[in-house]
Image (cartoon, rainbow, N blue to C red):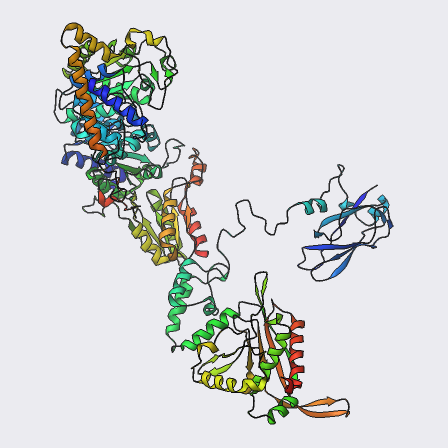
């Protein structure tokens, strides 16, 4: 969580320093939920994180270096500068790179789980993350329905952070609680405050366990508040100040640190050390990547097909 | 023994399922029912568990295909009518087509689109969308015109590691028959000379190949020999064969059943003009469907798409230029 | 009272507009049918516009010195209903709202920007389909470039394409058939002349002729040593005439007249199977006799095809003595970069009426021709040049 927060802060400052092209999207406030997913999954599982899941990615096995390489557009990163910021992953490791169309990744996770079934692989789970806004998409609806019909071990984690960009949830759905939808789909539901690390860990682990045991798709709806703009280009001035007073609006990282101190599992000194370690790790990665060369359009093969013999060789490079 | 275009597609799927356990078929009504057009007849029984009925969710079907492909399967998605593929358009063009380019992980899926008009089909059961999909880099788009090509190109589609949009023509399903299945074929990416000629080249694909051949017969009786090039796949487009043909004849007529704007006919002519301008002895012409949705009434439908008659007329006009 | 428009008539086959020179009547005048109301000028002539019927001039809407298109309304007459009916002019009446039905208002015309070409809705008025006998397809052009051919080479080829154009099949058949004949390689001289003549012919060329009495010239020549060639006399006379007025040797490029920088003249010399044209520089500044040695030298060098670079190119007009071949009449083609070529025919003894003696007397006479680019000069200027040359040749001692 801490590492994710430090990493996000670094991205934010790189953005303000003009070092990042394109958008920067942070997961501030969502770390507890996100890290719980990453920690609950195993090698061999499928994970489709979304925009604010830096913590979950790190917990699942993504490295800080890969995250920084993608943001800074290094050709050595997993996306080789062809896609950037949060659109990153390593499909063959089960970490699916998102596309921008919200809700689209869920059915991809479904398909991966169906493949496991075809191949006779059992005991794997697929987790997909979305926000409150994405629950309005047709893709979301088709996918959760498909998972239910096929009874797939899908764990769908909805981070309801009250806003989809500037749109409040009152303009996003009409049901009282998103988790009420589970009845309609025929899946199991879990609701929780998403800023409590302990609750998150417990709930996510339980949901993942049930899915893994073959009890069908699980839908988790976690309530929290987005503690940053939609992107770093957004100042979130539209956020209702009343919401900021809600219990689930408190910063999960602070809550976790307070808890550690209260329980005596760590001292302030430890927290500081860990923070410094995280900062150092991030800064080292940034330093490495900033020395890496930018992609060379003349060295790109500019071919979108794996089958080279079917490529029409329209190579625009000089 | 004779085999229809549709049966050839079925046979190819049966062979694919038999030869490779990674292949599965996913679509509406493909299971016990055997598919809306019977393209998967008996396959669910023969290959239990690998021919699955999907809910009416083209987006989820296509997304699942990509996910399954990432995990090593080779799915064939049957979309009931090409016209409905637009529901899953996002997953095809943004998820599947870009996956390899973004991640270096290939996406070996086949999307079968029953395309083209039949009498009474109307606006939403008749579309030809090969140009729309061809526009996106990362896709292979096939448009088989013969029973033999329907068979061998579908097999090759399954073998190709990239997403293949397989535009099979509904009108040809039961109308076209062949004596037997082929044992060899031109590779995908090569156009074939369906009919050699001397005075003009007609470049076309899918059902229009047959209209062009009929038109060529008409003109042969008038002393003009028309060469017909069957593109077989529109992406990749076999520019070499097209150029060689125009080099022989000097005149080009492109015929397509889809709409004019930005269609395959436009792409062919653009390439011939920019790369082979000096081969042309007359301005290149094209014949497409009328620029409206496909009409329902047979009278209107017959006038909407190119026919042997209208192709012959266009050819005569071009010969006179 | 009915109002009858006065309309700009069609004053000639290709006339599109005319300029009003003078208003012959004014508003309020009572005029008769066919009475002249306006004097207008086209680029060919000055004419009058007449009134279509008797009546009173209501208004004239034109200005002296302004141009108006054919069909424009120039003014209105008030006429009686009976006159209008009698003369069948009802069709020309304005409608009940006072708007013209068929005709164009002169006022609107003069305010509208003058435009030569009206774009069509889709853009430039070029044909979308390439039909027409002169259309050459890209393939044709490429093949012709490959074989070094020009449109002139195809003049004998029958075209089977639209409007009789030559298709690539016609062309290839033509080339194949050519191979069946005996072919020999044209000399580079022949090819060069062919190209020059082809390019020259892209202009509208015309020829005028004047028979000139050679007696004075021949007498002068007999008494001279060394003897100037006959063409040299003509060359010197042309030089003097052009130094007095160089306009006939100017060139027209677009709307500009390019004036000759110097009176450098060339003369034609037959060499092998072509023609060379050595140049004498500043022929206006040198006397005839002074030019003889150089002229003879150049003739010799030309015949041997050893002309020095300073004696080729840059001349503004050419003299050709086709009389040496015994020809009395010819229409030479000016060099592509020149506007005029002066030709001299063979001298013949012909009877000429002597007014003083009251009888025909024998004289030596030759036709002198001037072939010229008709864009630059007309028959009159050509005639005046020839007349001046004739006068100069009559006083050869002054050349």
The image quadrant of residue B134 is top left
Can residue C111 be seen in this snapshot?
yes
Q: Is residue B152 above or below residue C348?
A: above
The image quadrant of residue A303 is top left
Give coordinates of residue C83: x percent, y percent: 85, 47
Q: Is residue B99 above or below residue A226?
A: below
**Residue most toward the front?**
A269
Give coordinates of residue A44: x percent, y percent: 13, 24
The image quadrant of residue B159 is top left
- Determine whether, in the image, residue C331 is placed left or right of residue C5: left
Q: Quadrant of the C terminus of chain C?
A: bottom right
Q: Quadrant of the N terminus of chain C?
A: top right
- Identify which residue is drawn at 48% across, 74% down: C313
Give coordinates of residue C298: x percent, y percent: 48, 83
**Residue most toward the right?**
C30
Give coordinates of residue A140: x percent, y percent: 29, 20
Can residue C327 be seen in this snapshot?
no
B44, B23: nearer the viewer: B23
B166, C257: nearer the viewer: C257
- Identify which residue is drawn at 49% across, 79% down: C278
């Amino acid at each position: 969580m801490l590492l994710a927060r430090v990493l996000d802060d670094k991205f934010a400052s790189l953005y303000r320093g003009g070092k990042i092209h394109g958008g920067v999207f942070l997961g501030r406030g969502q770390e507890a939920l996100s890290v719980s997913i990453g920690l609950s999954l195993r090698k061999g599982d499928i994970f489709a994180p979304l925009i604010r899941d830096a913590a979950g990615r790190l917990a699942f096995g993504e490295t800080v270096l890969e995250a920084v390489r993608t943001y800074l557009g290094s050709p050595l990163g997993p996306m080789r500068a062809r896609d950037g910021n949060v659109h990153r992953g390593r499909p063959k490791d089960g970490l699916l790179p998102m596309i921008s169309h919200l809700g689209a990744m869920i059915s991809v996770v479904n398909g991966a789980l169906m493949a496991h079934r075809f191949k006779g692989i059992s005991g794997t789970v697929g987790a997909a993350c979305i926000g409150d806004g994405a629950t309005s998409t047709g893709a979301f609806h088709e996918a959760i329905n498909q998972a239910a019909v096929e009874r797939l071990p899908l764990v769908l984690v909805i981070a309801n952070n009250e806003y989809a960009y500037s749109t409040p949830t009152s303009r996003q759905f009409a049901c009282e609680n998103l988790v009420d939808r589970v009845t309609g789909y025929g899946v199991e539901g879990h609701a929780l405050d998403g800023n409590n690390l302990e609750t998150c860990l417990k709930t996510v682990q339980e949901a993942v366990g049930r899915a893994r045991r073959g009890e069908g798709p699980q839908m988790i709806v976690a309530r929290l508040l987005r503690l940053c703009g939609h992107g770093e280009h957004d100042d979130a001035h539209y956020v209702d100040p009343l919401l900021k007073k809600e219990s689930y609006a408190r910063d999960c990282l602070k809550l976790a640190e307070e808890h550690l101190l209260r329980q005596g599992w760590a001292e302030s000194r430890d927290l500081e050390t860990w923070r410094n370690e995280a900062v150092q790790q991030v800064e080292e990665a940034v330093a490495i990547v900033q020395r890496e060369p930018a992609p060379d359009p003349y060295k790109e093969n500019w071919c979108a097909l794996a089958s080279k013999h079917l490529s029409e060789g329209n190579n625009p490079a000089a | 023994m004779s085999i229809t275009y549709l049966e050839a597609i079925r046979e190819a799927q049966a062979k694919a399922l038999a030869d490779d356990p990674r292949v599965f078929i996913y679509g509406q009504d493909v299971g016990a029912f055997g598919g809306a057009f019977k393209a998967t007849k008996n396959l669910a029984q023969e290959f239990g568990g690998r021919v699955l009925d999907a809910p009416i969710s083209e987006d989820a079907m296509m997304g699942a295909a990509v996910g399954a492909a990432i995990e090593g399967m080779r799915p064939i998605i049957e979309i009931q009518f090409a016209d409905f593929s637009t529901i899953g358009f996002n997953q095809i063009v943004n998820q599947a087509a870009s996956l390899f380019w973004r991640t270096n992980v290939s996406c070996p899926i086949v999307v079968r689109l029953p395309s083209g008009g039949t009498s009474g089909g109307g606006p939403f059961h008749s579309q030809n969308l090969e140009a729309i999909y061809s526009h996106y880099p990362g896709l292979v788009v096939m448009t088989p015109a013969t029973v033999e090509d329907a068979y061998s190109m579908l097999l090759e589609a399954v073998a190709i590691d990239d997403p293949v949009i397989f535009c099979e023509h509904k009108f040809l399903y039961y109308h076209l028959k062949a004596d037997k299945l082929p044992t060899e074929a031109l590779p995908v990416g090569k156009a074939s000379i369906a009919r050699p000629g001397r005075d003009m080249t007609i470049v076309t694909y899918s059902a229009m190949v047959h209209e062009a051949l009929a038109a060529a017969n008409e003109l042969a009786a008038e002393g003009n020999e028309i060469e017909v090039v069957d593109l077989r796949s529109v992406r990749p487009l076999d520019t070499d064969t097209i150029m060689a043909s125009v080099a022989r004849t000097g005149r080009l007529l492109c015929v397509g059943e889809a709409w004019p704007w930005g269609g395959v006919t436009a792409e062919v002519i653009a390439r011939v003009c920019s790369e082979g301008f000096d081969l042309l002895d007359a301005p290149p012409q094209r014949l497409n469907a009328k620029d409206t949705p496909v009409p329902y009434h047979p009278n209107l439908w017959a006038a909407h798409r190119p026919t042997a008659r209208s192709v012959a007329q266009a050819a005569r006009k071009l010969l006179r230029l | 009272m009915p109002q009858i428009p006065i309309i700009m008539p069609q004053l000639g086959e290709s006339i599109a507009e005319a300029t009003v020179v003078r208003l012959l009547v004014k508003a309020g005048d009572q005029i008769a049918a066919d009475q002249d109301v306006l004097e207008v000028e086209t680029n060919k002539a000055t004419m009058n516009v007449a009134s279509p019927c008797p009546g009173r001039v209501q208004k004239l809407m034109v200005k002296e010195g302004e141009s108006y298109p054919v069909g424009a309304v120039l003014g209105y007459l008030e006429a009686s209903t009976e006159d209008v009916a009698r003369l069948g002019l009802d069709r020309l009446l304005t409608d009940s709202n006072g708007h013209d039905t068929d005709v164009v208002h002169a006022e609107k015309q003069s305010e509208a920007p003058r435009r030569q070409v009206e774009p069509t809705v889709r853009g430039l008025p070029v044909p979308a389909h390439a039909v027409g006998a002169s259309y050459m397809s890209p393939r044709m052009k490429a093949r012709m470039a490959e074989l070094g051919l020009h449109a002139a080479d195809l003049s004998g080829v029958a075209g089977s394409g639209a409007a009789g154009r030559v298709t690539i099949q016609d062309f290839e058949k033509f080339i194949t058939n050519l191979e069946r004949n005996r072919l020999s390689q044209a000399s580079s001289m022949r090819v060069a002349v062919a190209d020059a003549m082809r390019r020259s012919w892209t202009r509208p060329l015309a020829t005028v002729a004047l028979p000139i009495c050679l007696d004075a010239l021949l007498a002068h020549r007999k008494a001279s040593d060394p003897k100037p060639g006959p063409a040299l006399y003509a060359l010197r006379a042309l030089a003097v005439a052009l130094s007095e007025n160089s306009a006939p040797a100017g060139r027209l490029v677009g709307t500009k007249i390019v004036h000759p920088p110097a009176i450098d003249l060339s003369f034609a010399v037959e060499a092998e199977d072509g023609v060379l044209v050595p140049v004498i520089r500043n022929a206006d500044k040198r006397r005839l006799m002074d030019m003889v040695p150089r002229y003879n030298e150049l003739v010799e060098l030309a015949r041997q095809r050893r002309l020095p670079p300073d004696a080729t190119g840059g001349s503004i007009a050419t003299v050709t003595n086709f009389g040496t071949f015994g020809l009395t009449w010819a229409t030479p083609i000016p060099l592509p970069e020149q506007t005029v070529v002066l030709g001299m025919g063979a001298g013949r003894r012909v009877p000429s009426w002597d007014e003083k003696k009251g009888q025909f007397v024998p004289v030596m006479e030759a036709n002198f021709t001037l072939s010229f680019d008709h864009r630059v000069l007309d028959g009159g200027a050509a005639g005046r040049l020839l007349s001046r040359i004739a006068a100069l040749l009559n006083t050869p001692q002054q050349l």
